[in-house]
Amino acid sequence: MKKHFPDLEIAGNEDGNFRVGSFELVLDGELLWSKLDSGSFPAEEEAIDLIQERVKA
């Protein structure tokens, strides 16, 4: 991800309110992907596309 988005900051569970088994991709407060909702992790290219779409908007 850092290769495609050099300024990307990756953080985990900063507020301590995590959900067991979750993986969420959030950008500027907008949920882009939820493992709990989808049942899976996004493929790398899928995650990149989601971020690129949001950044362009």
Image (tube, rainbow, N blue to C red):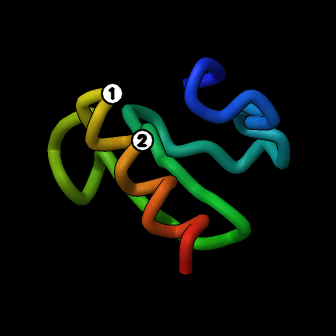
| Disc 1 crowd, CA 10 A, few/some/many (<14, 14-19, 20+) | few
Total marks in image: 2
Front-lying residue, 32 or 56: 56
- State left or right for residue 45 relative to residue 29: left
- In the structure shown, which secondary structural element does the residue marked by tag 2 occupy? helix
- Residue 44, image x, y percentages: 33, 27
User: What residue did someone put label 2 on?
Assistant: 48
Residue at image location 50% in from the left, 54% down from the top: 51
User: What residue did someone put label 1 on?
Assistant: 44
- In the structure shown, which secondary structural element does the residue marked by tag 1 occupy? helix
Residue at image location 44% in from the left, 38% down from the top: 23
Q: Amino acid at mark 2?
A: Ile
- Residue 16, image x, y percentages: 78, 42
Q: Residue furthest bottom?
A: 57
Q: Amino acid at mark 1?
A: Glu
| Disc 2 crowd, CA 10 A, few/some/many (<14, 14-19, 20+) | some
In terms of image quadrants, where is residue 37?
Answer: bottom left
Q: Are marks 2 and 1 in contact (CB under 8 Å)?
A: yes
Residue at image location 45% in from the left, 35% down from the top: 20
- Residue 45, image x, y percentages: 29, 33
Marks 2 and 1 sit apart, C-alpha to C-alpha, by 6 Å
For the C terminus, which image quadrant? bottom right
Front-lying residue, 25 or 53: 53
In terms of image quadrants, where is residue 7?
Answer: top right
